[in-house]
Image: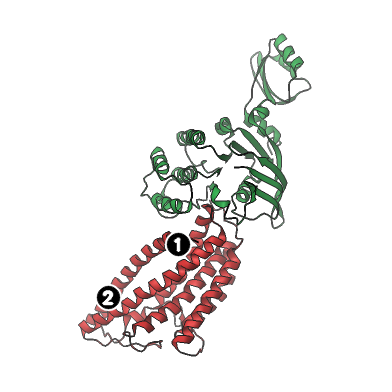
Chain colours: A green, B red
Amino acid sequence: MRVDVEDLVLRYGTVTALDRMSFGLEGGKIYGLLGRNGSGKTSLLSLLGAFRKQTSGQVRVGGSPVFENPAVTPEICLVRESGECTDLGSAEDAFYFAEWLRPNWDGDYARSLLDLFGIDPKTNVKSMSKGQRSAMGVVVGLASRAPLTMFDESYLGMDAPARQAFYDAVLADYMAHPRTIILSTHLIEEVSGLFEEVLIIDGGKLLLHEESTTLLSRGHAVTGPVGRVEAFTSGLTVLGEKTLGPTRSAMVYGELDDERRRAAAATGLDLGPIAMQELFIHLTGGPR
Amino acid sequence: MRFPSRLLAATTVIFLASWAAFTVVLVAVTLAVHFFGDLTHSAWEAAATVPRWYMVINGAMLIHSFLPLYIAHGQTRRQFGAQAAVAALVFVPLVSVAMTLGYLLESGLYALLDRPQVLRQSHLFTEPSQVHLVLLEYVVEYLACFAAGMFMGAGFYRWSAGGLLTIPFGVGLIVLGLSAAGSDFSLPLSSFALGLDLPRGPGFAALTAVVAFSVGLALTWGVIRDVPLRNKV
């Protein structure tokens, strides 16, 4: 399901959370929404999910405005840590309403996910551990089979094995039931393998929107003898470096043309990819 | 619009359990007073404040718990508002029937105990056996209480502590409904009472209930029509 945002502004009193943001997302892809704390990720997703009304600008899903549009909102599912879909009695109670309100709800799949995450359907959600509550949100989000499904850091409370199970489930269900999925996260390295495209926002503005492979192609790890690495990276944007004895590995940002690549090969330097997280840190201005 | 069957089912199940508990406690209190004290008046009438507060809280919880659920599941605020209104219009008579049944159960109990079921307060009815008037009085009271609860619940959901400003309007709706039924608004464990001197009669009471409920719904809609969902973690 296609998403279009145009000149989107959201203000909380005097604070501008989103500042004239515009972008378009094709349907049927997995998107990563990255940004630092307070960058506007949750605000943006809240507008896409019709959880709140924008101050100005347009939000369109499937070509139609979202807020209070009953033709569109059932096609959207936004899962947050706050547990709007789940904090109502037991897991079974949550499913009772999801089944009734969600047009594409898959109850069998939901129960299989409960098994996967080891959740007793009769347990009161509010009495569950943080990880289990996060998993409940994930279950409802995936089983809703909404054409636009968004997870706003809703899996951060889960432990590492449960998160891996979630990533596997997202990918498997996406392959079986293609739809538009947006994952907002701080665990960039864990999830980046799922992203087909990445949006990075900072200070309420869109900093970058491009394919993951394009973004990753902008960063390189240059490894080799210290002197040669220093010489090669002179004049390039160096994001960081590590030295072990006579060997240094430097992370550089920017396109490397064929001439540079040939020069690296000729001097015995190894060129490799760097992590998306390093690029994210660089693009959002480094430590503050 | 779909009939809010599951919304009603959820609230009704909780109500029936609460009503059963309330009835058991009142029967126990009645028997205790009968055997160890002096049972002179209707206990069901004396405890009338409890179900009124229950209805206020239920109205508030309907907004607080179910509005976020509905929106998060892709329903609009308008769809929720319509379903909440229909649910209230079914739930209030259902509760009223159960409460009327309570009076009849008490009549049977008092007959068994050979005690007169004397009423202390003014009502639309003079005897608990006037079932249609007992039912009407409950409907009038509870419609006002439920609508007031919805409005105040919406206010607290939207503005947190700022919701305190909705309380005078909510209390006003409750006072209107109770006064039309011949009763006063009172606080638990307190002698405080607030009432209006309104004309008495079933017709006027029914009309007042319709007005109070409509005003309460309109006020609630004014608050929730573009309410943002809270992001509480």
Q: Which of B89 and A201 lies nearest the eye of the viewer?
A: B89
Graded by Cα atoms within 10 Å as few (under 14), some (14 to 19) or many (20 or more), the crowding at tag 1 reads some
Residue B27: which numbered mark, if any? 2
Going by the numbered disc 2, the residue's amino acid type is Val
Parent chain of label 2: B
Q: Which residue carries the number 1 mark?
A: B4
Residue A219: which numbered mark, if any? none
The quadrant where residue A239 appears: top right
Residue A104 percent across, percent down from the top left? 48, 46
For this view, does B88 lie left or right of residue A257?
left
Does residue A71 lie above or below A156 as drawn? below
Q: CB under 8 Å between callouts 1 and 2? A: no
For this view, does A44 lie left or right of residue B115?
right
Q: Which of B136 and A240 lies nearest the eye of the viewer?
A: B136
Q: Which of A175 and A36 lies nearest the eye of the viewer?
A: A175
Q: Are marks 1 and 2 on the same chain?
A: yes
The quadrant where residue B25 appears: bottom left
Does residue A145 lie above or below B79 as drawn? above
Label 1 SS: loop
Question: Is residue B193 something that shows in the picture?
Answer: no
Parent chain of label 1: B
Give the residue drawn at x 62%, y 52%. Answer: A66
Residue B39 percent across, percent down from the top left? 27, 84
For this view, does A122 lie left or right of residue A267?
left
Label 2 SS: helix
Given this view, does label 1 or label 2 mark the residue nearer the observer? 1
Graded by Cα atoms within 10 Å as few (under 14), some (14 to 19) or many (20 or more), the crowding at tag 2 reads some
Q: Name the residue at the right extreme.
A: A235
Going by the numbered disc 1, the residue's amino acid type is Pro
